[in-house]
Image (cartoon, helix red, strand yellow):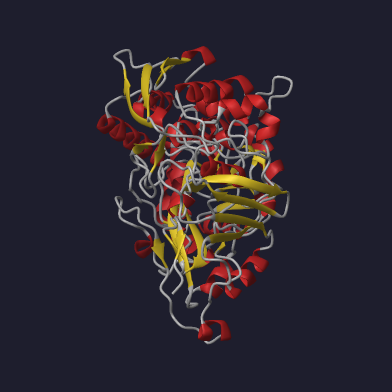
Amino acid sequence: MADARLVGGIILILIIIGAAVLLLGGRGEEETTTTPVTTPTETTPEATTPTPTETKTETTPQPTTPTETVEMGVKPNTPEDTLVIAMDISDAVSMDPARAYEFTSVLVVNQIYDKLVDFELPDLTKVVPEVAESWEVMEDGKTWIFKIRKGITFANGDPLTADAVVFSLQRVLKLQQTASWVLSQFISSPDQISKVDDYTVKIVLDEPYAPSFFLATLTFTTSAIVNPNEVLAHEKEGDLGSEWLTDHGAGSGPFKLEKWVRDQEIVLVANENYWRGPPKLKKIILKHVPEPGNQLLLIKKGDVDIAWDLLIDQLLELEGVPGIKISRIPALFISYVGMNVKFEPFSNEKVREAVRYCIDYDAIINDILKGGAIRWQTVIPKGLLGALDEQPFTRDVEKAKQLLAEAGYPDGFEVEMLTPPTPPQIDIATLIQANLLECGIKVKIVQMTAAEMYEKYRKQGHQMILAAWGSDYPDPDNNAKAFGNYRVKQLAWRNVWYDDYAADLAEKAAKEFDPQKRDQMYKELAGYILHKGPYAVLYQQYNQVAHGEWVKGFIPDPSFFLVDFSKVYKEYS
């Protein structure tokens, strides 16, 4: 779900290679072409892979290196009550929750607004209350009742009641902006959202869906609660205040939007009326620093607290620098090779299995990505319900050749593989090309821009493709539909894998109310796709962020919209 819009900025949740290979439109339905090339401390896949239940962030140890910066240590030059972040903010379009869909935009919106429910990072398995203190689903499986927490006020002092919740969610459906699909996939009409009393909201879904699925999507910033009084006071020609909300905030979150100067900075200030108590930080400054090299210089001088978009060499340079930490967390991004089943050799399951045995996964992770990913070969990311921790494929040339011979291709075949022209994609493609040649498969690498590549991919015009998929919300449905259900016309459809068993299972799992049964259904689907699907999953990406040791309480975001600065503070010794 991550290639639907062309973003000029850097992927929020990843330490990436550059803006040239970013998303191609709306995130909800497409893939990213970027891959984090980051540097953990361990080098083996076994060492870099947390246990299935482990979700804590990790930091690199601090060995000493003989540079002047290291000898003296990095000291902060920023105010203790102000968090200064160096990042590329050029992708931001609007701070209106109904419109925000870019990495920077949703990062900011998540600080300004509250939602009915949220996740408590790093745990992505359990939704927790926020504006809604409790909820229940009726016997019909479609009707939801949310009890709104009393005592919450917006930043201007107005009370947050059921009226605000109903207005905000209906507003999303009425405006029908790009991100509205996250809500409209469950709710066809604004009339299905109504007020029961001042602190009770009723939402009627089109069909019964798994509670964990629906709740997970409500954590996305599209469902943020806006102040209807402020919004309607700035309405123009029926836009429901959208133009005004582009540069202003009307939320109840821990921070307020003070100013946004395009391609310069975004400044947030603490909401002293925040219902959970004012945040420790009084100000957050997102400085527009598009060049990772400049971000590196700033973090080494202590002129910023966080460098958001560093490249592999820069992270290696910071490894071991006193005063600097690199925090990481497995991200909900999976890199894979797609094989078009209408290309004759790939219609044979044994050929696809042979390709999976040809690839040197360890070399990709350790040599190209420098350990900046975990070994993962199934389509639901580690950390989510239904994640299947099975890694059956290792490089085995003889087994691959045997499978090819059994499939009727003892001498291999020729195939084209699409890839963006940027590292690390081109490096990974070149390695896979060499791997497959040893198995008898001659790969011609075709480089094209991300926009061109995904246009071709959407039309089923490829033979092989090197791509990645980022989850839009922390629920397995997102990946299960994309990789398994051809009917939604995402990845399975693009690779012409019309498998009704997989499609039916993905649809049934989305509506299964029993969490344990749902977990097992997704594991079954992931295992089925692992061997029968048209993919070779290469790895799951890490999100790593470099920051000063004085920054406390910071947890990197495994998604692209859940980072929470209300828990962050700075501690100068």
For the residue pair 193 and 573, the one nearer the viewer reads as 573
237 up-or-down from 459: above or below: above
Note whether residue 224 is visible: yes
- The mark total stands at 0
Relative to 571, residue 233 above or below:
above
Q: Which is more toward the observer, 13 or 46?
A: 13
Residue 444 x, y percent position in the rendering = 65, 51
Which residue lies most toward the front here? 157
Q: Position of residue 460 (x, y in %)?
A: 62, 33
Q: Quadrant of the C terminus?
A: bottom left
Query: Measuring 33% from the left and 43% from the top, which residue is drawn there?
Result: 388
* 120 shown above or below 546: above
Image coordinates of residue 213 in percent, x first then y, are: 39, 30
Q: Is residue 457 above or below residue 45?
A: above
Residue 327: x and y, percent? 45, 62
Residue 387 is left or right of residue 93, and the answer is left
Task: Please state if 88 lies on the left or on the right of 72 as rendered.
Answer: right
User: Based on the displayed image, in which of its 4 quarters is residue 312 positioned?
Assistant: bottom right
Who's the residue at 52% across and 29% down the image?
182
Locate the N terminus and report the quarter of the image it occupies: top right
Q: Is residue 341 left or right of residue 162?
A: right
* Residue 560 visible: no
